[in-house]
Amino acid sequence: METTVLFLCAALSLAIFFLLTSIRQRAHGRKKDGNKLLPPGHPALVFLAKFLALRRSIFDLGPLLRELHSRHGPVISIRLARTLVFVADRRLAHRALVQGGATFADRPPPIDPGLMFNGGAYWRLLRRNLAAEARASFFAPARQRVCDRLLVNIQSTNSKEDDKESVVTLRPLLRRATFELLVYMCFGAWLDEEILEEIEQVQHQILRSVTSFPIFAFFPSITKRIFRRWWAELVAVRRRQDHLFLPLIHHSSRSKAQDPPPPSCYADSLVKLRLPEEGDRPLTQSELVSLCSEFLNGGTDTTVTLVEWIMAELVNNPDVQAKLRHELVHGAGGGDELDNNLQEMPYLKAVVMEGLRLHPPGHFLLPHGVQADSDIGGYTVPKGAELNFLVAEMGRDHTVWKDPLQFRPERFLDGGDGCGVDITGSREIKMMPFGVGRHMCPGYALGMHHAEYFVARMVRDLRWLPPPPPPPPVEVPAPAAAGGGHGRDPGFHNRHEAPATCTHPRPSCHK
Ligand code: HEM
């Protein structure tokens, strides 16, 4: 009874809230204070209905936002719990993120459940550590170890006897390899399969909770009571994470048989860190756990998605694959020194850059907070709004890139339209897969290094072939509720031709 009353109150409050914001939304695109325009956009209710119809995460917003941009231009806004402003123009992005100083440099204040899993504002301090760790040769053996296992797993899935046309889904194998590597870099230990699996599950739950619709941002004291079971589950996940991570951070649960321990891991660097602006205090236990969590979640799916897309493009473009293979086999890519020689492989670099341009793993950034009323593209963006950018649109801008939808790594070599492009965007933005400015991805060097190494190993040591032709259509219609794929399954179909594998690209455009 009590729950029903609370639920009705919440539903009524939400309805009134959205009605009011809808009315305010009508002011969008009209003059504010007699001279400035607020960015145009959908009424909140329409947007919310469309978003909820997707029933997925905030990363599925891409198509909705693209539709709004095509209708309203490069700057749009949506008024929900906060005003969300999205920018699709690269020059406006440069002005805001690189020239805009502190106005758009910080994250907005976190809201639950993100608040519970947030590591604080220390990324600027940690950026150096991450970049250094990417180059550090002491992690090269770890990369080699997980990649050796990955290749064995790909082949063993694919080498059933008499099975010339088996199907392998690359993503879970690639994901496990990347995750295991990052866990090792984070805690300095190879974990038992069971613990690794549990950490992976906890991290997945956290990622899902912070990317799903932020219901607890609306009247938190009411929504946390109504969805009390859901909230309790999130609190339990956080406790479980503390329980798993803290012994690993302080090395009290390390296996004795470490072969040999790395000189330093990411958790060690966090424990040693002092915050000068806060009286040189060390990080709290909770901050340590959250920062390790962000390290694992920030670096896993981004890298996996990028590598998966690149492999799909290499299958569709056999000439590119052959050229890359040639560089790897006959250039500096042979033998165990591959990890140290990545710098000497211009075509490999070009392939990864082209992957980042055409298939950036995130189609927009993490939100940036607006510190003061500002002007973007002639519109007023109010203080307290959240600003974001359509990353994928910028990499596919036909005014910058020739044939932008074609996968052509050559564009990043001498004379190409991508030659010398500055991935940090400090001079100008042509693509921004890692963001730009003060909140640019702190793990960008690490992400690129991992992508280059994984792609290099898979192309050098296996041959990737086009998919087998699809089977002839089945005469008898399948029942409507027969399950099956929903168009997002990133399945890779492999035909075995020792030592070859073959893949087929993701069937539809990803988020
Ligand atoms: C191909 C790989 C990667 C891509 C494309 C990528 C992309 C991004 C993007 C677009 C952002 C948001 C930037 C902004 O809001 O301005 C971000 C933030 C972040 N990334 Fe990455 N990333 C990658 C790899 C990694 C790796 C390997 C790590 C760490 C191991 C990492 C850790 C983070 C963290 C912690 C943040 C949040 C930083 C903050 O709040 O300021 N990323 N990344």
Image: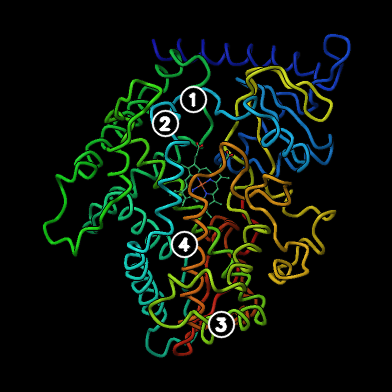
User: Dot 3: few (<14), some (14–19), or many (≥20) neighbours within 10 Å?
Assistant: many
Q: CA distance from mark 1 to mark 2?
A: 8 Å
The tag on residue 450 is 4
Determine which residue is flagged by label 1: 110
The percent coordinates of residue 375 (x first, y second) are 78, 23
Lower position in the chain sequence, tag 4 or tag 1: 1
Q: Is mark 4 within 8 Å of ligand 1?
A: yes
Q: Closer to us: mark 4 or mark 1? A: 4
Q: In what element is the residue under mark 3? A: helix
Q: Position of residue 340 (x, y in %)?
A: 43, 70
- Badge 2 residue CB within 8 Å of ligand 1: no
Instruction: State the separation of the CA atoms marked 4 and 2.
Output: 25 Å
Q: Which amino acid is tagged 1?
A: Pro
Q: Amino acid at mark 3?
A: Arg
**Residue that mark 3 sits on:** 325
In-front residue for pair 473/161: 161
